[in-house]
Amino acid sequence: MTKIKFELSTLPSKQQKAAQGKSGFVPAVARWVIERSNAWMERCKILVKNFERTLSNAVTKLNLCFVRLMLKRLAASS
């Protein structure tokens, strides 16, 4: 087993928000990246329901979803 350690991103203080000219809710950078990734995954119809028997099959489907997303972006930029 591998132990995974992560750190929560720090929330900006009121003074930092005022210096940036923002007020109210300001999303944390790391959380935004994860939320966008989850939204992109939900677009893959193969991932709507998880009927996989093994974890390796489920991970493979996730990887295929992101490969498809990257290929679409590469094709669009060409």
Image: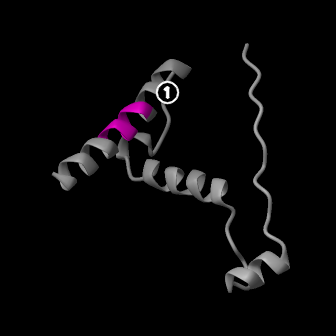
Residue located beneath label 1 in the image:
59
Q: Colour mode?
A: one colour
Magenta region, residue range = 63-68
Looking at the picture, how far across and down is residue 78, in whole percent? 15, 51
Query: Up-down: is 28 above or below 75?
Result: below
Can residue 39 be seen at all in this image of the molecule? yes
Say which residue appears at 44% left-offset and 53% top-offset: 40
Say which residue appears at 84% left-offset and 79% top-offset: 14
Looking at the picture, how far across and down is residue 10, in whole percent? 80, 58
Is 2 part of what is drawn in magenta?
A: no
Say which residue appears at 73% left-offset and 13% top-offset: 1
Say whether residue 71 is left or right of residue 50. Answer: left
Instruction: Describe the element under mark 1 as helix, strand or loop.
Output: helix
Query: Up-down: is 27 above or below 69?
Result: below
Query: Up-down: is 62 above or below 26?
Result: above
Query: Up-down: is 60 above or below 72?
Result: above
Query: Picture quarter containing residue 6?
Result: top right
Looking at the picture, how far across and down is residue 66, in whole percent? 39, 40
Of residue 48 and residue 72, the one placed in the foreground of this image is 72
